[in-house]
Image: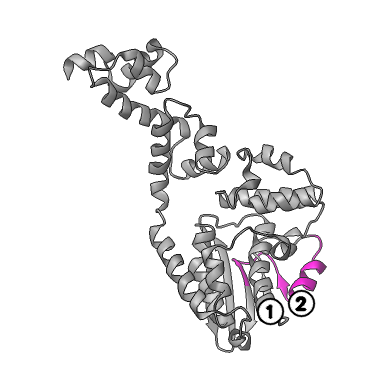
C-alpha cells in the first residue's frame, strides 16, 4: 500500500488526499508495508485509478510498482525453477501478502486453471482488485521467463466494464468473460514447464524456510483482538485512542475498526473491556491512590473513573477494595 501511494505521488496525483480519505497514519509512505483490509485495498485501488485518471491502472501496477523489498512469498516464487513451481508457491504463500487472498491451481488435462478469490467476499471486491491479482501473476510469468505467456481464457467475477479492449490487449486474448463465479486464467499446460531466468536453488531453500516459518507464526484472525487489546493496555496512560493504536499497528484507523468489526466488536467495546480488567487489578492494589489508578487507565479525573468502575463491577472502587 505505501508503494501505491508513492506511485500516485510520483505521477502527479494527490497522495495526501488518499492518506486523509483512508485515515492512514502519518508517514505511511516511508514504511515498507502497512496492513490494510481487502475491502479497503479495493477502494484504494479504485481511488488511485480515479486520481490518476487511469481506469486500467491495475493492469500496469505489477510493472510500475517498486517495492523496497520482496515479500518472502514473492522471493520464493522468483527463485522457483519453473512456472509450475512458481504458481504453486503463489498459491501456498498468498496469505503472507493478504490473509484473505486465496489462489488455486487446477490441472485440467492439457490445460491448467489459476483461480483467485477473496475469502469472506463472495461477491468479490472492486474490478481493480480482480484485475490486479490476475495481472500480477501473468506479468511475473512473462518477466521471469522472458516469454509472452498468453492465456487461453480469462474470467472475472465483476460485471463487464464499458471498455474491454485494454483487457484484450493486456492478456493477449479476446476470450475474456465477466459475471462468472470467480476470477481466473486458463493456461496451456506447456507453459508450466517454462524455466524461470531467476531460478536459484539456494535462495529458494532459504526463502521457503523463512516463508514456512512465517506461515506457521501467523496469528489466526481471532487473535487479532488479543493483539489490539495488548496494545491498548500498553498505551492506556499515554493515549489509547483508535488513532493511537492503529498507528502502533502500522494500519489506518479504518482498517483497525473493520478488522475488529469482523470479529464482532467495536474499538470502544474492546477499550472498555481492557480498562475494566486492568481496573480490577489496579484497584486491588491498596498501595495505589485512586487518582493514580484513574490516570493509569487514561481517565481525566477520579469521578469519571469511579462512574465507569461502578458500571463494570456494580460497586465503587472503595467498596471493591473492602470486599477484596
- Mark 1 Cα within 10 Å, few/some/many (few <14, many 20+)? many
**Residue 288 at what x, y percent from top left?**
28, 17
**Residue 185 at what x, y percent from top left?**
64, 74
Q: Which residue is mark 2?
A: 172
Quadrant in the picture for the C terminus: top left
Decide which of tag 1 and tag 2 comes sooner along the chain. Answer: 1
Can see residue 264? Answer: yes
Magenta range: 162-184
**In what element is the residue under mark 1?**
loop
Rendered image: mark on residue 151:
1
- Front-most of residues 277 and 46: 277
Q: Quadrant of residue 227?
A: top left
Q: Quadrant of residue 231?
A: top left
Reply above or below: 99 against 231. Answer: below
Reply above or below: 281 against 87. Answer: above
- Front-most of residues 151 and 140: 140
Q: Are marks 1 and 2 in contact (CB under 8 Å)?
A: yes
Relative side of 16 to 323, left or right = right
Amino acid at each position: 500500500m505505501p508503494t501505491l501511494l508513492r506511485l500516485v505521488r510520483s505521477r502527479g496525483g494527490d497522495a495526501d488526499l488518499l492518506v486523509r480519505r483512508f485515515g492512514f497514519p502519518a508517514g505511511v509512505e516511508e514504511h515498507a508495508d502497512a496492513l490494510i483490509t481487502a475491502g479497503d485495498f479495493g477502494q484504494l485501488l479504485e481511488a488511485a485509478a480515479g486520481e490518476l485518471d487511469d481506469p486500467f491502472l491495475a493492469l500496469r501496477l505489477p510493472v510500475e510498482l517498486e517495492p523496497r523489498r520482496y515479500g518472502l512469498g514473492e522471493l520464493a516464487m522468483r527463485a522457483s525453477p519453473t512456472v509450475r513451481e512458481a504458481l504453486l508457491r503463489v498459491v501456498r504463500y498468498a496469505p503472507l501478502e493478504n490473509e484473505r487472498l486465496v489462489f488455486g491451481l487446477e490441472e485440467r488435462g492439457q490445460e491448467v486453471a489459476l483461480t483467485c478469490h477473496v475469502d469472506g467476499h463472495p461477491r468479490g471486491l472492486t474490478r481493480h482488485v480482480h484485475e490486479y491479482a490476475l495481472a500480477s501473476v501473468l506479468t511475473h510469468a512473462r518477466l521471469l521467463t522472458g516469454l509472452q505467456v498468453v492465456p487461453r481464457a480469462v474470467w472475472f467475477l465483476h460485471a463487464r466494464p464499458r471498455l474491454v479492449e485494454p483487457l484484450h490487449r493486456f492478456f493477449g486474448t479476446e476470450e475474456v468473460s465477466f459475471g462468472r463465479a470467480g476470477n481466473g486464467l486458463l493456461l496451456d499446460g506447456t507453459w508450466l514447464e517454462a524455466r524461470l531466468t531467476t531460478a536459484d536453488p539456494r535462495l529458494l531453500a532459504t526463502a521457503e524456510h523463512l516463508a514456512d516459518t512465517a506461515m506457521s507464526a501467523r496469528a489466526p484472525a481471532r487473535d487479532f483482538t488479543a493483539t489490539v487489546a495488548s496494545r491498548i493496555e500498553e498505551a492506556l496512560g499515554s493515549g489509547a485512542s483508535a488513532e493511537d493504536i492503529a498507528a502502533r499497528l502500522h494500519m489506518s484507523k479504518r482498517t483497525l475498526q473493520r478488522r475488529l468489526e469482523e470479529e464482532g466488536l467495536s474499538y470502544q467495546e474492546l477499550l472498555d473491556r481492557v480498562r475494566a480488567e486492568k481496573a480490577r487489578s489496579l484497584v486491588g492494589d491498596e498501595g495505589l491512590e485512586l487518582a493514580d489508578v484513574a490516570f493509569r487507565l487514561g481517565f481525566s479525573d477520579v469521578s469519571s473513573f469511579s462512574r465507569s468502575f461502578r458500571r463494570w463491577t456494580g460497586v465503587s472502587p472503595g467498596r471493591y477494595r473492602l470486599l477484596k
